[in-house]
């Protein structure tokens, strides 16, 4: 079990209340347990079988030796098969180091720094990076922000990217998953005149898909190859993994933009996505605050150190590099980057 820092301040009921969709979530107090949300309510719950823990980001039970848990450093390191840094679920200013043989050590971050699980490093921060409901929810979804009603969080691999709705429809409705004209945070009630899910390509910002296939209203969605549309078109810059151009027409000069930190631009989806979900053919360390990234065309057997640009190869007993978790493991993580084909830019 690879543990990350955990906040027990959220209950499964509170998490379901922020999610408009139906599906599974993790239990913040038990890494083997899960809940099921429907209609913004917790309608059922259960526990994975012995030897399995619940993977909140994929929404399924998985092997305890290779799956993130949220219980304790001790339990984590007892199951870890290779050396790895882990967060302390009880103290964000500390981290643990599993030696891969069932033992571990504890370290302290420098003053005013906290351990960031996604980067496996200490960073300057005022709040715990792992103190978010996204820690226990599926990756690539949008949920309401429990600390700021009317705004939303984009969950990416257990981390939360805060977001706000466009000026025309400024209020995020957690019950519908859409940006709306009327605020549901007051007595005005829920507005039915919704316009767009925050994953729609509005203005000149590309954001991550929530997996539903919805792109909002037709006015702001993109359709590649159409030359007679008022919609903004998005195209890769063919140089970086995070850069893209926003064009209002084929005769207009494109405006260069960059994805939010931690994401790459997918020219096929025309959205910013998790790097593991798109095998970008350029420098994959671009736009990433992380030490190691998978090397393309290696089936996840090779990784690159983003600080030195030196390649490394996973050992034969744990041949697959999991760039989301930051360690080598014995099973193929199944990410798009692990496929053998080279990405083709559009």
Image: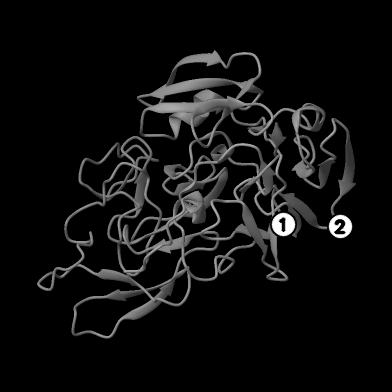
Question: Image point 83% across, 43% down: which residue?
Answer: 97
Question: Image point 21% across, 40% down: which residue?
Answer: 192
Q: Which class describes the residues within 10 Å of circle 1: few (<14), some (14-19), or many (20+)? A: few
Color style of the picture: one colour
**Position of the C terminus by quadrant:** bottom left
Answer with the quarter of the image where residue 177 lies. top left
Front residue of 34/124: it is 34
The image shows a total of numbered marks equal to 2
Q: Residue furthest front?
A: 316
Front residue of 298/126: it is 298
Residue 290 makes an appearance in the image? no
Is residue 192 placed above or below 119 in the rendered structure?
A: above
For the residues labelled 2 and 1, the Cα–Cα distance comes to 11 Å
Q: Residue furthest left?
A: 228
Q: Are marks 2 and 1 in contact (CB under 8 Å)?
A: no
Numbered circle sitting on residue 110: 2
Q: Nearer the viewer, mark 2 or mark 1?
A: 2
Q: Which class describes the residues within 10 Å of circle 2: few (<14), some (14-19), or many (20+)? A: few
Residue corresponding to mark 1: 125
**Position of the N terminus by quadrant:** top right
Is residue 339 placed above or below 261 in the rendered structure?
A: above
Q: Secondary structure at mark 2?
A: loop
Residue 7 makes an appearance in the image? yes
Q: Secondary structure at mark 1?
A: loop
Q: In the rendering, at what x and y percent does residue 6 appear? A: 69, 35
N-terminal of the pair, mark 2 or mark 1, is 2
Numbered circle sitting on residue 28: none
């Amino acid at each position: 079990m690879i543990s990350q820092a955990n906040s027990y301040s959220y209950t499964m009921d509170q998490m379901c209340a922020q999610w408009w969709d139906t599906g599974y979530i993790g239990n913040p107090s038990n890494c083997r347990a899960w809940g099921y949300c429907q209609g913004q309510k917790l309608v059922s719950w259960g526990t994975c079988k012995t030897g399995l823990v619940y993977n909140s980001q994929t929404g399924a039970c998985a092997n305890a030796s290779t799956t993130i848990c949220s219980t304790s450093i001790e339990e984590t390191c007892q199951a870890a098969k290779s050396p790895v840094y882990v967060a302390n679920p009880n103290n964000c200013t500390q981290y643990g180091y599993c030696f891969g043989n069932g033992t571990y050590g504890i370290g302290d971050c420098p003053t005013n720094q906290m351990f960031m699980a996604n980067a496996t490093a200490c960073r300057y921060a005022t709040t715990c990076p792992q103190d978010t409901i996204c820690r226990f929810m599926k990756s690539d979804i949008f949920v309401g922000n429990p600390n700021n009603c009317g705004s939303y969080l984009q969950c990416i691999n257990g981390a939360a990217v805060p977001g706000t709705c466009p000026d025309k429809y400024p209020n995020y409705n957690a019950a519908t998953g859409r940006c709306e004209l009327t605020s549901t945070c007051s007595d005005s009630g829920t507005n039915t005149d919704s316009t767009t899910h925050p994953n729609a390509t509005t203005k000149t910002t590309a954001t991550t898909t929530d997996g539903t296939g919805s792109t909002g209203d037709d006015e702001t969605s993109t359709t590649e190859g159409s030359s007679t549309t008022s919609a903004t078109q998005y195209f890769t810059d063919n140089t970086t993994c995070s850069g893209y151009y926003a064009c209002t027409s084929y005769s207009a000069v494109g405006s260069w933009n960059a994805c939010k930190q931690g994401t790459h631009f997918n020219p096929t989806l025309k959205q910013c996505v998790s790097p593991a979900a798109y095998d970008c053919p350029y420098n994959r360390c671009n736009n990433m605050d992380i030490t190691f990234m998978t090397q393309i065309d290696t089936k996840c057997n090779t990784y690159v150190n983003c600080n030195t640009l030196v390649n490394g190869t996973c050992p034969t007993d744990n041949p697959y590099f999991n760039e989301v978790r930051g360690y080598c493991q014995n099973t193929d993580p199944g990410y798009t980057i692990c496929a053998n084909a080279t990405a083709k830019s559009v």
